[in-house]
Image (cartoon, rainbow, N blue to C red):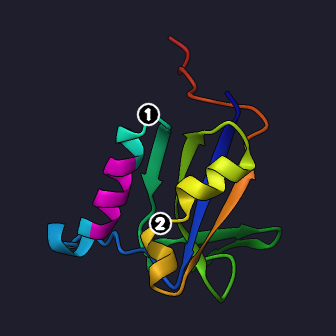
Amino acid sequence: MPRFAILIYAGDSRHTRTATPEELQECDEHFDSLVASGRMRAAYALTPRSMARTLRADGPTDGPYGSGDVVAGFYILDAADIDEAIHLARKDPSLLSGGGVEVRPVHSGGPVTPPA
């Protein structure tokens, strides 16, 4: 079954080091529903933009790559096609708070096992 990356765009990540379970409840409920659907393959929440470092040709800089919304996290879903992936991602909490999601087919890759 094809895989799709769901990139979450928001003003910033909700996943601060001090975030409470109540502050993350909406995100956790969405995650749990995707796990229950059998479609979730991996999920990663990123830390707030203030913790980012950007690499450019002239060296590293503090902060995220862009000045607008940032990628706050991403997850990988199995779906029959992009329409089903969009249907599954449509309930992402970032959409309810003015952010967005990008649904993109995964070309290749997967977990990497470090050399022994």
What span is in magenta?
Answer: 26-33
Q: Is residue 23 left or right of residue 112?
A: left
Q: Amino acid at mark 1?
A: Gly
Image quadrant in which you'd find residue 25: bottom left
Secondary structure at numbered mark 2: loop
- Residue 67's spot in the image, x, y percent? 66, 88
Q: Magenta stretch: dominant SS? A: helix
Q: Nearer the viewer, residue 16 or 62?
A: 16
Q: Nearer the viewer, residue 36 or 64?
A: 36
Q: Amino acid at mark 2?
A: Asp
Disc assigned to residue 89: none
Q: Nearer the viewer, residue 99 or 38?
A: 38
Residue 49 visible in the shown view: no
Residue at which label 2 appears: 92
Residue at which label 1 appears: 38
Q: Is residue 74 left or right of residue 38?
A: right
**What residue appears at the point 29 percent right and 58 percent down from the top-left corner?**
28
**What residue appears at the point 47 percent right and 66 percent down from the top-left corner?**
92
Mark 1 residue crowding within 10 angstroms, few (<14) / some (14–19) / many (20+): few
Mark 2 residue crowding within 10 angstroms, few (<14) / some (14–19) / many (20+): some
Residue 66 visible in the shown view: yes
- Residue 36's spot in the image, x, y percent? 35, 39
Q: Nearer the viewer, residue 21 or 48?
A: 21
